[in-house]
Amino acid sequence: MKADIEVAVEDSEQNASLSKNQRKKLEKRMRLQASRTEKRKEEKQRKKNRRAEQLAAGIEIPPPKRWKKMEASNCAIQVAVDMSFDHLMSDKDLAKALHQLQFCYSVNRRAENPLQFHITGLSGRCAAEMERKAGNGYSNWDAHRHEQRYLEVFARTNVVYLSSESPNVLSRLDAGAVYVIGGLVDHNQHKVRWRHLRAASDAIFFLLAFL
């Protein structure tokens, strides 16, 4: 495994010159990814073994739960996560943002009637990182993916951009609206820039009372 990681690092250096510190970070990240992949394989095998033991013991195994797909959902509410801020995040913060995105998707996927889940601005580093993590199932997500930013996907008049700093409170959901959540993890590093982006945007900022 270590040899494979070193080869992968050397391949990446053909496209970009890496400093010693960057090389160490890349090797660490690849080792963690390889470890997660191996653990998932082991867990999958353990589940397979447990199922075989239960069948051999005559234990009835309930069928796996089938989650409802968005197209079959009775919920027409649209929510979009704006992932166009990857250029403002460090690798560590981008990983955290993707983890939160995965959590949001997971909650929606298991809902009795999942809402219409969109991911916009999915390009650049964000798209590359999600592609690299394809082993986590990203490639099979039941979600609408868009390389374009939200205003290129949805009508401007339908966009409601949610912000924790907004003085406005939205008390109900409109099926004709698209509620956009900023996919930015920055620990206040870009607070001023974020306010500038918010002021320059033509979208309306609201905060859902139950968020």
Image (tube, rainbow, N blue to C red):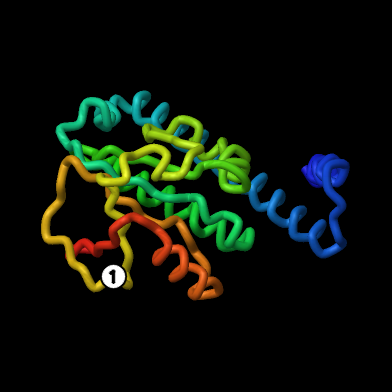
Please indicate whether residue 84 sits to the left or right of residue 118 in the image: right
Residue beneath the point at 58% across and 61% down: 88
Residue 42 appears in the figure = no
Q: Secondary structure at mark 1?
A: loop
164 over 67 or under it: above or below: below
Question: Residue furthest toward the left?
Answer: 172
Q: Residue at x 29, y 29 (%)?
A: 64
Placement of 76 over or under 190, stated as above or below:
above
Residue 195, image x, y percentages: 44, 70
In the figure, residue 144 lies in which quadrant? top left
Q: Nearer the viewer, residue 92 or 181?
A: 181
Q: Please state which of residues 36 and 125 is positioned toward the viewer in this rendering.
A: 125
For badge 1, the amino acid type reads Ser
Position of residue 154 relative to residue 89, above or below, is: above
The number of numbered badges drawn on the structure is 1
Using the image as rendered, state which of residue 43 and residue 211 is in the foreground. Answer: 211
- Label 1, on which residue? 166
What is the quadrant of the N terminus in the image?
top right
Residue 208: quadrant of the picture: bottom left
CA neighbours of label 1 inside 10 A, class few (<14), some (14 to 19), many (20+):
few
**Residue shown at 52% from the left, 56% from the top:** 85
Classify residue 195 as left or right of residue 126: left
Q: Is 120 left, or right, of 208 in this rendering?
A: right
Q: Residue at x 50, y 41 (%)?
A: 43
Asked whether the viewer can see residue 207, the reply is yes
**Figure quadrant of the C terminus:** bottom left
Quadrant housing residue 201:
bottom left
Image position of 146 (left or right of 160): right
Q: Position of residue 185 (x, y in %)?
A: 49, 64
Residue 68: x and y in percent read 24, 30
Residue 119 in percent (x, y) is at 42, 42
